[in-house]
Image (tube, rainbow, N blue to C red):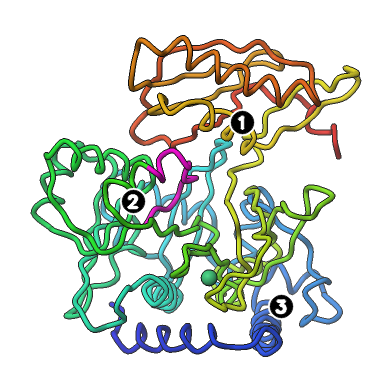
Amino acid sequence: MIKIATILQNYLRVKRIQKYSPQRFRRWQNKHLQKNLTWIANHSPYYRQLNIGNISDLTQYPFMDKQMMMDNFDALNTRGVSKEEAYKVALAAEENRDFSPTISNATVGLSSGTSGSRGIFLVSEQEQAAWAGTILAKLLPNGFSNKEKIAFFLRANSNLYESVENKKIEFAFFDLLNHYDIQIKRLEQYQPTILAAPPSMMRRITEAIEANRLNIRPIKIITMAEVLDPLDEVYIETIFQQKIHQVYQCTEGFLGCSCSHGTIHLNEDLVYIEKEYLNDEKTKFYPIITDFRRRTQPIVRYRMNDILTLKSEPCPCGSPMLAIEQIEGRMDDFFIFYNKEQDDLEYIFPDFIRRACITASDNIKEYKVIQHTIDRIEVQILVVDEERRRETEQKIASNLLSYLQQTVQCPRITFAPYEEKDRLAKQKRIENKMPITEDMKNANS
Ligand SMILES: [Zn+2]
């Protein structure tokens, strides 16, 4: 159980750090980074056998990704837990929907990656407390003056998410596996003050409110776990009459959230971030993260797949932490075409495809764009006015082509009615389903 003192402690810490000048913040961050690296180098069998020269120097550590982390799971973690044992516990929990069992006092969580590779993670009770404290401190609208009831929609539970309940705060966990009607009824009964859900679920909830099937008045709405598409953002904000707050979180950690000005700041008070730039203007990058608090399963120079866009102007809130314009989605969802000369491949950021669609017409209610092959993309739309469907499709096609023809061999664009996603699948409005060949992986690198 997490104590209110831990939460308060984290709350105060967060508030204090946010006021630091950039120089002071970097000094504070470096101190914590070096301290954790030193601890990890001495306690993780994997890092011990690497014999790193200067263990407080991050640049001497190798990069890691999900594959590497899973391949070296047994030696990396500092609790002597084997991957096999951890899987057993996680799978049993998933099957029984009972997430209380731990292993060597650590919670095991399972992540379903988009690429199909399953990840597994270990978090200690202390790390959970720090995590919950920080997430609450950053998201609670009124500090601790009112009791907050938080409805949390999640794909899979772990006891990470059930850890907070007391006089000031209460979490209710909503399993995304449950039936939609049951969830709507339960929401009505629960009357959350804070509602947190992936954008696709938030959209369904918003639809229920619009249809007068649900009456709730949360003071804060938070989306997480999927890319928030501008189309959904506008719809949800209009119905709820408030700004959406975004939490950028994944199995690798709680990486960022939006401030009072709606800007997403990366949680540089929890993780140290290196940037791998993706364009010459240095505005888009993959974050490489080093968590300077997690010790059970160290995260050191972990390369994420997400494309982030830096905010060009400083945020008026004054936070020294990195401000992000947009979380664009995963590298897997780049669209790939032949270049004009047909001698190389060209990668198109999902954001360009997204903008071409949503700026095409106000008749689009929902949309999805799928790349099937190198020369074919499919656009699915749900429209407000069926009579204008044809015209809307033509506008989308011309938007897409006018952009694409500048750089690539234009694909064929086909249209289809909008298909609802599987309830458990992550919502992706821009998706590349094309089989990726070795050629493609090696191009552009
Ligand atoms: Zn800000």
Mark 3 or 2, closer to the camera:
2
Which residue does the image show at 27% across and 83% down from the upper left? 144
In the rendered image, residue 78, in percent from the top left (x then y), is placed at: 58, 72
Is residue 232 in the magenta section? Answer: yes
Place residue 334 in its image quadrant: top right
Disc number for residue 7: none
In the rendered image, residue 344, in percent from the top left (x then y), is placed at: 88, 24
Mark 3 or 1, closer to the camera:
1
For mark 2, what is the residue?
197
Place residue 424 in its image quadrant: top left
In the rendered image, residue 363, in percent from the top left (x then y), is placed at: 40, 24
Label 2, residues with CA under 10 Å away: few <14, some 14-19, many ≥20: many
Rendered-image quadrant of the N terminus: bottom left
Instruction: Establish if 262 lies above or below 396.
Output: below
For mark 1, what is the residue?
353
Magenta segment, which residues?
A: 222-234
Is residue 9 in the magenta section? Answer: no
In the rendered image, residue 53, in percent from the top left (x then y), is placed at: 86, 79
For mark 3, what is the residue?
41
Residue kind at label 3, given as amino acid type: Ala
- Whether pointer 3 and pointer 2 mark residues with C-beta atoms closer than 8 Å, the reply is no
Residue kind at label 2, given as amino acid type: Ala
| Cα–Cα gap, marks 2 and 1 | 25 Å
Which residue does the image show at 62% across and 78% down from the upper left? 320
